[in-house]
Amino acid sequence: MKKLDGLAILFLVLGGIVWGLVGLYRLNLVEYVFDREWLVRIIYVLFGFAFIYHTISWRASSKKKKAKR
């Protein structure tokens, strides 16, 4: 589970960097590195799954912490 958490955080950080570059410089790093449209879509889906997974696991862990109080 810790490996999956680390992987999700890695994708969240990478996604944040990518969207920051898009917002600041209109540079889409994913499209620049991966020339195939289908591969770009898969990477963006992975960014989205990482966000969903991290949000769900964060809410579950915060509920456990509240129950311990």
Image (cartoon, rainbow, N blue to C red):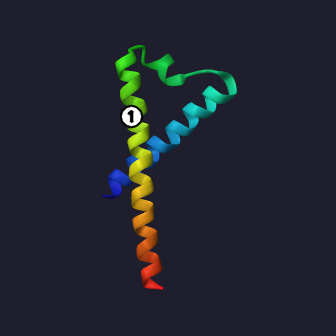
Toward the viewer: 12 or 41?
Answer: 41
Toward the viewer: 40 or 33?
Answer: 40
Q: Which residue is rendered at x = 41% and y = 75% of the image? A: 64
Judged from this view, the residue extending furthest toward the top is 35
Q: Position of residue 28 (x, y in %)?
A: 55, 22
Please indicate whether residue 54 sits to the left or right of residue 18 in the image. left
Q: Is residue 59 above or below residue 39?
A: below
Q: Is residue 51 above or below residue 40?
A: below
Q: Which residue is rendered at x = 36% and y = 22% of the image? A: 39
Residue 5 sits in quarter:
bottom left
Looking at the rendered structure, the secondary structure element under dot 1 is: helix
Residue marked by disc 1: 45
Q: Quadrant of the N terminus?
A: bottom left
Q: Position of residue 69 (x, y in %)?
A: 48, 85
The kind of residue on which mark 1 rests is Val
Disc 1 crowd, CA 10 A, few/some/many (<14, 14-19, 20+): few
Q: Position of residue 23 (x, y in %)?
A: 65, 29
Q: Which residue is rendered at x = 61% and y = 26% of the image? A: 22
Please indicate whether residue 58 sits to the left or right of residue 18 in the image. left
Toward the viewer: 3 or 16?
Answer: 16
